[in-house]
Amino acid sequence: MKIVTTRRISQVFFFSLFVWFCIVATVGSKLWQLRGWPVDWFFQLDPLVAVGTVLTTHTLYWPLLWALLTVALTIIFGRFFCGWVCPFGSLHHFVGFLGRRGKKLAHKVELNRYRKAQRVKYYVLVAFLALAAFPSAAATLQVGILDPIAVITRSFNLVLLPIVDSPTSFIFVSGRFYEGGWLIFAIFLAVVLLNLAIPRFYCRFICPLGALFGIIDRFAIWRIGKKQRECVNCKLCQRDCEGGCEPAGNIRISECVLCFNCLDSCKHDVIAYQTKTSAAGEVTNPDISRRGFALSLASGLFGVGAIRLSNKLGSNWYYKVVRPPGSLPEEEFLKRCVKCGQCMRVCPTNVIQPAGFEGGLENLWTPVLNNRIGSSGCQLNCVACGQVCPTSAIRPITLAEKLGVNEFAEAGPIKMGTAFFDRSRCLPWAMDKPCIVCEENCPLSPKAIFTREEFSTVRDGIFTAKEFRGDTIEIVENNLKPAKFAGGDYYCVVEGSFRRKIEANSENSLTISADEQFRNLAAKSGKIEVQVRLQRPYVDIERCIGCGICEHECPVSGKKAIRVSAEGETRSANRRLLLER
Amino acid sequence: MIEANGGKIGRRKLLMRVGKAGAAIGACGLASYLLYDPTGPEARSETKEPAILPDFSIPREAGQTISIVQGQDRVKTIYKAIELLGGIERFVKPGDVVAIKPNVAFASPPILGATANPQLVAEVVRLCYSGGKAKKVIVTDNPINDPTSCFTLSGVGKAASEAGAEVVLPKPHLFRRTTLAEGRLIRDWPVFFGPFEKADKLIGIAPVKNHHRAGASMSMKNWYGLLGGRRNIFHQDINTIIAELSMMVKPTLVILDGTEVMMTNGPTGGSVSDLRRANTLIASTDCVAADSYGSTLLDLKVSDLPYLAQAEKAGAGATDYESLKPARATIS
């Protein structure tokens, strides 16, 4: 079998595996659901995630040890990951192939020549790593913006899958929605379409992971090269060169993605994958200028200050950034989150959403809870998000830890925030309408939402009694809407203290279960007051965990009358509300 | 391919072109005529043909309207309760498609009693197949929490499918708009219609639960799960909506499970300390009677639950369950 055929099989296999992992990141026990599939495996193989988190946290989180395998294989064989494994690379490879099909040899060679701009990816990498290595507590991990595994995972999981599933609702029963998904889609579409202009555009010019491989593969034991200096210079080897690494001349080892197309196209057996240095000479180091390197390093170092000008980590923190349960304190969180969207994908209720810029630049695409989207707030008995977080920005907590039971009883439950009533919008508070849907749905026992019973006189609710007939009081007024007070929530009061439930009403009568005493009093005063019984809701701040189910269910469906914000979250000591726990 | 002809065009070709142009204009004109709307859209249009739920009820038989069975084991009590009403054969005929609507409102484990007991649901499914010779049994609900999670965590999904039922989740296309002719609240409102459209029989299964707004959530409140859309707004008039639901849904049988009763913190519960063992299971063709008896398990009176009287007044059933001469039994 030809080596390019093997390479294609490998690409199809890993791409299919990647798509499969996207599909099965669904909570459930069926074969196509999460069960035990290692859906984070591509992130674990990704040394950029490993190196990035090592720089920010000074530790290597254990599942990321897989990256060592990738690094070792790259040192031995070159950038095999780009050409053989990376699902994003394979996608670019395929679209680039479609784009140049039928073009003339010279045109193809021109498309696949080396360009100076290919050094840009190294500057991207240096800037990201400098941000991560900022020599103080202020480091921030932003590699996820452009890391290819993060980009394709985000794009497939948060955009393509919901779109493809929307006609059948096969995976997502209640549909899937992601706030600001259009931006993720637009970026994905742009970089995929750029392959039509220049094949593997993303890989050659942008990809920071490719850049990292380009730096470490200088020691590669095996490498592409020419066996002899002279050849007929037919340029067939550069016709389909995926890396744009110019194998016909001084091959640029750091750009070669090991597609082996040159090896396959050379009719004269001049190109080889060998341990020897290319007979035509080779360039092992990336084409980085000293000035460019210094500039990108500086932009990374000062970037943290620039990103944080809005003081979103200080007193100006954005209260709507409610993180999933088990999230680390904000500074630590931002050192680990790679914006991959796995937590948003796996969340059974769709409440975890990609953040926009409102919580600060570095907050982009990090997970926040939006209780207005999805099928429910954060479900009490669920800890799925932490189980799929590849870097433990959301720790893989147990249910006991989330609920604060057993060995976690002393620590208490994890609070994501606190629910606050907006009494100017709440039906029982602002409009004298019974409701308490929030109370009904609070999942805690005892509930964090409790009510106090109050009776409020309805508008124009004073009537004059005319006559008593059995349980029916005829009134002088003659303009009541029939059955208006019949729902079981309305009461009649006579001056003094007697209150009786209204069972029915006509235009000019009220039916109550009236006893003798009530009748006597009413007959004496003549005045009857109609009141509505309200259960006005309150939040018990000591019990509320900020799950947001109340906010999701609140019937005031626009700007909700109860809303969760992050005050009181247990992960940040400086955002607490209670004096003691 | 158009051939160069020195800028000239033949008569034949010109006529052809004129003919085609005429046909194209004519087609546009015809389409405009057929699609012509002289008035423009109305401010808000109600559904012209509301979907009406079928009537699943069966003829009444004296002394076999409601049964009350005491016992700890739901598998035994449900069998006895149905037997006292004439056996499953009375309710399910061979070849029937039976829809079962358990209360699966919350993503909560079965031990907390916030949802219908999975063993009870499975046993009813089995009875429908074995005694009733049903062709197909569907188990379905439109929960409050995430549907998939509710069916998974409550154990109802697994128990029902293992007993051979088809579990139907509330996908958007299964909803249709309905209007209850004699109703005030259910007007042009989306209901979960799909699973019931082709069913022959309907069985409701609900636990007895405390409910701070409605007083209690039992077999009538269980029909809330059929409502779609922003159904929470009905909490403003909770009694009327529950009464209207009992008018809209005419089940074959309801099973009210008071084996463990949620006395406090309902309807979500959340702790086993919210539950009390009452060891009572009720089967009834009259959900008003079933709930009237059920209220006693919560230490409530019929008058504490205004929707019962409202439903009775609307003809949905009887609050005076004793007048129906309940069939009683105790299983040790």
Image: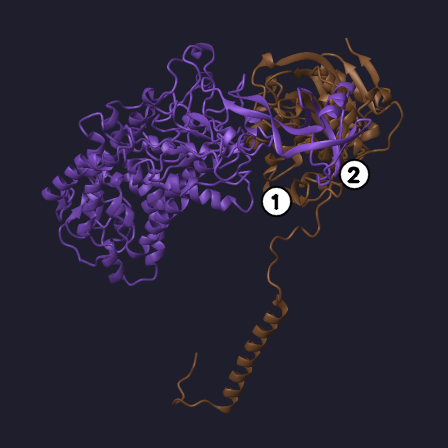
Nearer to me, A488 or A445: A488
Chain letter behind tag 2: B
Residue B61 relative to residue A109: left or right = right
Q: Secondary structure at mark 2?
A: loop
Q: Of the residues shown, which amino acid type is indicated by label 2?
A: Asp
Nearer to me, B101 or A411: A411
Placement of the N terminus of chain B among the 4 image quadrants: bottom left
Instruction: Pick whichever of labels 2 and 1 is earlier in the sequence.
Output: 2
Placement of the C terminus of chain B among the 4 image quadrants: top right
Residue B48 relative to residue A354: left or right = right
Q: Colour of chain A?
A: purple
Determine the image quadrant of residue B151. Answer: top right
Nearer to me, B231 or A196: B231
Would residue B277 be visible to someone looking at this image?
Answer: yes
Q: Of the residues shown, which amino acid type is indicated by label 1?
A: His
The numbered dot on residue B55 is 2
Q: Which chain is brown?
A: B
Chain letter behind tag 1: B
> Disc 1 marks which residue?
B173
Q: Secondary structure at mark 1?
A: helix
Residue extending furthest toward the top = B332
Please name the residue shown 56% across and 18% down the image.
Answer: B270
